[in-house]
Image (spheres, rainbow, N blue to C red):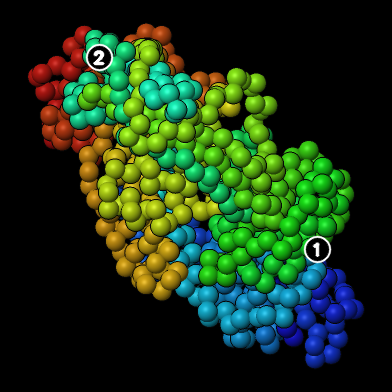
Amino acid sequence: MHLYIAEKPSLGRAIAAALPGPHQKGQGWIRCGTGENAATVSWCIGHLLEPAEPARYNPAWKKWRQEDLPMFPDKWEVMPKDSVQQQLKVLESLIRQAKTIIHAGDPDREGQLLVDEVIRYFGASAPVQRILINDLTPAAVARAIQSPRDNREFRRLSHSALARQRADWLYGINLTRFYTLSYQRQGEQGVYSVGRVQTPVLGLVVERDNTIEHFQPKPYYRIEARFRAQEEEADQQTFTARWQPNEQFQDYLDEENRLLNREVAEQIADSVRNRPGTITESRFRDRSEAPPLPFSLSALQIEAGRLFRMGAKDVLDTAQNLYERHQLITYPRSDCRYLPEGHYSQREQVIRAIARVAPDLEEACNGADLGRRTSAWNDKQVDAHHAIIPTSRPTPNGKLSDAEEKIYGLISRYYLMQFAPDAVHREGKLTVRVSEHEFRATETAILVPGWKTLELKLREARKEHEKAPLPRLEKGEPVFCDDTSLSERKTQPPQHFTDATLLSAMTNIARFVTDTELRKTLRETDGLGTEATRAAIIDTLFKRDYLYRDSRHIRATDKAKALISALPESVSKPDRTAVWEANLESIRRGEGDPRKFLDTLKEEIRGFLDRPQGRPTVDSESIGTTSPEAQPHCPKCRAPMLEREGKFGRFFACTRYPDCRGTRPLEEATPLDGTGQKPIPCPHCFSPLVRRKGKKGWFWGCSNFPGCRQTLDDDNGKPAVRLRKST
């Protein structure tokens, strides 16, 4: 029996539809054909297995205790996910019967791992082949089935996914427990989640918010001059040019070369007014611009976020529906913007399908130049999957939603752009020197719109007075400055992140790295996260109360700011995480060793745990204004207590829970047992003393009782210096 294992049911059904009949459906499988050529198609439902919880390795690791850190498993284990155990049993039975297994996971790192781990979990001995399906239309699936490859060719891809999974476990569990326990001991509540990707993403948002909050606007000055040619036979049209700063004025410029001193600006304006000058540079040209490449997932999410204000997860979910349910687009979780050269032959069918599905693009489809071939078709740039484009399916499976229509239309437009003429820009530049000052005027205009007619605009362009073209003056021609103008402007803070700009930041993370060499390395990687995970990372930060929405902007909560302020920069900055992605990519290419990668990570984790940590800085209003000395302490261990909500109302609980289960009712007055005071050490064993009431009245006893039986007399609510009894 040939067994096909797909990543999800929809892909399994598409494979079965492309195999010869008759078809017999069962619980979690479809049998296709008869006799020797019979095949069974089954599927995973995402990951059927997950990394084992800490308690699986060591029962003591079930409790959160600082003394158990770091937690490094000797031998890695996975365990079935409760929600999909039935499907796992189906696959176990089928794998044991199979003579050949065909791996049909999605063509990416996680798709490779989630089928590989099931095959490995059941110790399959049958040979394994691999098929790569980017397009769920029957013809495309049939072509993929006819082109199987040896699954061993993809073992390095699986190794990189496994290294990523284990790195996330080590980093996330150890650091989350460490920081949470550290803050609980200082009176904070809740879990402080730390992750190798989510925390640097959070750091970007917190840093941006802090920059805006502390931004101080400064005035700067722009100098413009109006010139005309001096020679009568030259073009007499006037033009306006802007002053260009030079080294002579460095002391008066900011880091963006803006002039900050008004007096200097006025001196420059006065010194060139009614003075002759010379054209030192004259350049005019018509520049062709090729169409943009078809979409990868990140590019699609960024553009849809900008145009339609859709969240990253909304875009991914919509694209997934178009792929799985409607079969109108190719595999959406792609990080590639190029197409296989073999796809070029399908252009006519695809364009006909676009015209049927999106009638508003019918005119563009009819005008497409099918003889044009852009750089998008390039086999050398295509790896496991290619750019997201429409399929040749001419009808959806039901009515498209508004979001689906928008995303399908956007993907179709970028495909049709490949068959539209280049856009042609008319560009001009004149540089004028007056004495020691340089002024520059530029001209840009679209001469031939070409593919730009397919671009969607964010809003209708405001009708403005068209800027007059520059006079065609030659280098060396004399000009005269008729007048100058000085305008004061204010520096502006950066904008808060939106879904589109945060995704762009995650994709182009090198912009946020100061180290020059590291920046070069990062430009060659995918940035923070992967195409398939970025939307989920942002969504997770919202769920964990680290981010919130302020209209279309994404802002950081006080909890997020508290965490980032307390973390070492190497945890909250993108440098380290992006380098890890580069290491995972080197493992995929066969250049890196996954064991060495994890050993290095373990050493880094040990370094974090050995470093003393600060207290998260939160607004005093959010935790109350009571000083630590006035807050109650645990009657059992004398650690600080926090007010919590229980099924019988609010109460004080020990911050060391679950290691200590000390509680006390809420009291308006200072507790009689002394737990409202700063802990006083036992003179014998130095454990905190506790005030207790006996037959003869109040006294102080050691909290380490019965291990230590030290007691002291009570002196007006405080322990007396004279010892009452010692052991």
Q: Nearer the viewer, residue 409 or 47?
A: 409
Q: Nearer the viewer, residue 664 or 536?
A: 536
Residue 203, can we see it?
no
Q: Which residue is mark 1?
A: 349
Q: Mark 1, residues whose alpha carbon is within 10 Å: few (<14), some, or many (≥20)?
A: few
Q: Which residue is mark 2?
A: 271
Q: Mark 2, residues whose alpha carbon is within 10 Å: few (<14), some, or many (≥20)?
A: some
Q: Position of residue 27 (x, y in %)?
A: 80, 67
Res. 15 image quadrant: bottom right
Residue found at x 39% / y 20%: 227
> Nearer the N terminus, badge 2 or badge 1?
2
Q: Secondary structure at mark 1?
A: helix
Q: Tell me if residue 605 comes above or below residue 425 in the rendering.
A: below
Q: What kind of residue is marked 2?
A: Ser
Q: Position of residue 488 (x, y in %)?
A: 37, 12
Q: Position of residue 273 (x, y in %)?
A: 31, 13
Question: Between marks 2 and 1, how big is the CA–CA gap?
Answer: 66 Å
Q: Tell me if residue 274 comes above or below residue 414 in the rendering.
A: above
Residue found at x 40% / y 57%: 524
